Amino acid sequence: MTLHMQHFDYQGKAVCGLDEAGRGCLAGPVFAAAVILHSNDIPRGLNDSKKLSESRRLALRAEIENRAQAWAVASVDASLIDEINILQASIRAMHLAVAQLEVSPALLLVDGNRFHPYPGIPHQLVIRGDATYSCIAAASILAKTYRDDWMKEAHKLYPGYDWEHNKGYPTARHIAALEIQGASPLHRKSFVVRKQLRFPF
């Protein structure tokens, strides 16, 4: 049940939830999603994506995509993350997602405490928003599942890092692989260097 989730009402106007996935990873893009839900048609069971099983996230993704008023997903790759830093890349991915929406929202509800104003649309920051508001929880689910799918495909190109399971996060197996064989072209150089691991190019 979605007892703890709230629908944010902004004078009856469209509210867009925004969240990202992959900020703490050593490899791959950061993904962001923007979701506008119908106030009278909110999927049951929405929650912070990290609190849901993979199968439940995928089931909810299908419901969100079928029932939302509008949704979009965008990403920023590792090379740009290295160039502008992960915070700026996360915000850029959110802006890119908003730009793809087929419905223009009246308000952006952003998970976290940092954001750059999006032209023409006011925003509100919400700490732990993905565990509070349904539209942000929906965005967290889309961002997480689309990024996981991307990393599973990347694992086929570079199987040595166990991305199929760790999705690019710094698990012991991932770090051990980096220490043995160095980084792949999909690793974030700034993240790998920060951990004092080898980078071969």
Image: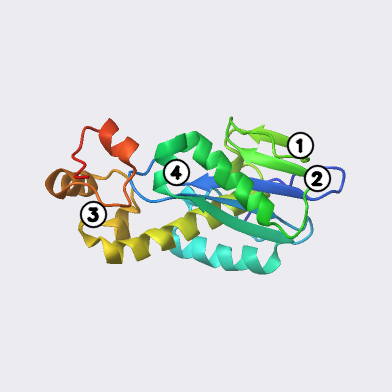
Q: Residue sitting at 33 percent across and 52 percent down?
A: 186
Q: Position of residue 190 (x, y in %)?
A: 33, 36
Query: Element under label 3?
Result: helix
- Name the secondary structure under disc 2: loop
Residue denoted by label 4: 80
Mark sitting on residue 161: 3
Q: In terms of sequence position, does the residue under pointer 4 or pointer 2 come before the other?
A: 4
Label 2: how many Cα within 10 Å (few below 14, some 14–19, many 20+): some
Along the viewing direction, whichever of 75 and 110 lies nearer the viewer: 75
Where is mark 1, residue-wise? 122
Disc 4/disc 2 C-alpha distance (Å): 29 Å
* Cα distance between the residues tagged 2 and 1: 7 Å
How far apart are labels 4 and 3 at the CA level? Answer: 21 Å
Ranked by sequence position, the earlier of labels 3 and 2 is: 2
Q: Which residue is mark 2?
A: 106
- Residue occupying image coordinates x 40% and y 45%: 79
Number of residues whose C-alpha sits closer than 10 Å to that of mark 4, classed few (under 14), some (14–19) or many (20 or more):
some
Indicate the amino acid at tag 1.
Answer: Pro
Q: Which badge, 2 or 1, comes first in the chain's sequence? A: 2
The answer to which of 161 and 56 lies nearer the viewer is: 161
View extreme (left): residue: 180
State which tag comes first along the sequence, 1 or 3: 1
Marks 4 and 3 in Cβ contact (< 8 Å) = no
x then y, percent, for residue 101: 70, 57
